[in-house]
Image (tube, rainbow, N blue to C red):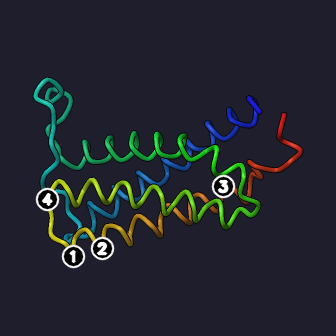
Amino acid sequence: MKKRFLRYFFWLILIVFIFTIIDLVLHYSIEYLEIYYYPIPNFLKFISDSPTIWYGIGKFLGSFIIGILCYPLLIKIKYNLNKSLTLTVITVLLLEARYILSGYYTISWDLFNAINHFIVLFICSYFIFSKFKIFDSKNKN
């Protein structure tokens, strides 16, 4: 069980990294999805004062933590498609709830952002779950 979790842990880092990078590229290249505000702690502004950079850091950390918390649920699901769908829905709902509650962006921005997140995270997670057989029974030990 421990090795299986560690295997998932390392692949989750890759999934979330790819998800974050693709999302940041989309936010940089699609004007409608531009990140113009993100709360940056004053003591960290020396690193960067770009809201998009901090949005990416927040997304990476948030998605990673949610992914770890989803592990006990994901190991009980049989098919990779359903695992990816579960991870994606839970992650996107929690991330988008945070963005909506912040009130910094419009409802339409939140909707397009949710669609963007759903598509990108689902494709990344399904590809990696299927290609590398993270949850196969032979990898349980």
Residue 112: mark in rendering: 2
Disc 4 is placed on an element classified as: loop
Q: Secondary structure at mark 2?
A: helix
Q: Are marks 3 and 4 in contact (CB under 8 Å)?
A: no
Mark 3 touching mark 1, by CB under 8 A? no
Residue pointed to by mark 4: 103
In space, the residues marked 1 and 4 are separated at their CA atoms by 12 Å
Q: Nearer the viewer, mark 3 or mark 2?
A: 2
**Is residue 44 shown above or below 37?**
above
Give amino acid for label 2.
Phe
Residue 132, compared with residue 118, is above or below; it is: above
| Residue displayed at 54% across by 65% down | 122
Estimate the x, y position of residue 102 in percent, counting from the top left.
Answer: 17, 53
Q: Decide: marks 1, 2 in contact (CB < 8 A)?
A: yes
The amino acid marked with disc number 3 is Ile
Say which label, 3 or 4, has the lower sequence index. 4
Name the residue tied to disc 3: 128
